[in-house]
Amino acid sequence: KYYNNPETIWIEPEANDEHFKCVYLNKMFNVDARTVTENSLDILHISELHSFGNKKRPLPISETLDKLAHGHHRYTYQYEAGEDSLASKVFGIKELIVENEYILPHTTVARVRFGDFVNTIVTSAFPVSDNKTQLFVKAYRDNWVFNNPIFDSLFDKITKDMMEKTLCEDKAVIDTIYKEYRDGNFITKYDNLVKLYREDYSGYVDNAQN
């Protein structure tokens, strides 16, 4: 089958790019892996929940859908940076390009392009049980890379602390979702990536069981 073929194993391009630094995190969630994965694909929750979002203008300016491969889709959003975001406060950049994608069964990528820089978050959700998921996270950056162990370790720690805060924010919300409400209705067009993932994942599960 397609997903058992070693030649089709997906690796993010940042992993082989020496311009990027990466930090690693993981967190246990008390919910199923599909729900954890869907959370990473929800573009609107960024503005509503996380400190780096834009609560004043939470909606993307534009969006484009691309099918990259079987079981691999990406939405690209043009997005206005929040006043308190890293891009706005530190770099003075007002517009972002946010790429959000999934690779079946439980991998997501959130790539934020601001000016000449890229920050990329790759998540892989491992289903421990029907109601427990270990989420593994890789956070890449090509800003604040000095190729100096002292400075790089300092900004590695800053990046890791920011990501830990984000994961705790996500966990506080996701762990409170009752099972009977996890398959809620899709309300806006910005739910399309989550809807597409859910449909693809359902087909993936059905195929794996046959």
Image (cartoon, rainbow, N blue to C red):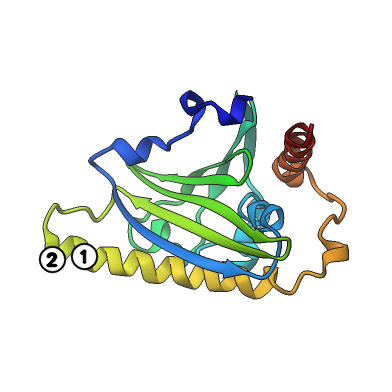
Residue 46 as seen in the image, left or right of residue 11: right
Crowding around mark 2 (Cα neighbors within 10 Å: few <14, some 14 to 19, many 20+) is few
Foreground of the two, 183 or 206: 206
Q: Residue at x 47, y 24 (%)?
A: 7
Q: Residue at x 40, y 56 (%)?
A: 87
Under circle 2, the secondary element is: helix
Crowding around mark 1 (Cα neighbors within 10 Å: few <14, some 14 to 19, many 20+) is some
Q: Is there CB contact under 8 Å for labels 1 and 2?
A: yes
Q: For residue 153, which numbered disc appears in the image?
A: 1
Residue 19, horizontal then vertical, whole percent: 24, 42
Q: Residue at x 61, y 25 (%)?
A: 2
Foreground of the two, 174 or 136: 136
Residue 3 as seen in the image, left or right of residue 190: left
Residue 50, horizontal then vertical, whole percent: 56, 67
Q: For residue 43, which numbered disc appears in the image?
A: none
Q: Which residue is mark 2?
A: 150
Q: Give the CA separation, mark 1 to mark 2.
A: 5 Å
Q: Amino acid at mark 2?
A: Ile
Confirm whether residue 51 shows in the render: no
The N terminus: image quadrant: top right
Confirm whether residue 160 shows in the render: yes
Residue 142, horizontal then vertical, whole percent: 29, 47
- Picture quadrant where residue 199 is located: top right
Residue 159 as seen in the image, left or right of residue 174: left
Residue 57, horizontal then vertical, whole percent: 63, 57
Residue extending furthest front? 210
The C terminus: image quadrant: top right
Q: Amino acid at mark 1?
A: Ser
Q: Is residue 120 above or below residue 160?
A: above
Under circle 1, the secondary element is: helix
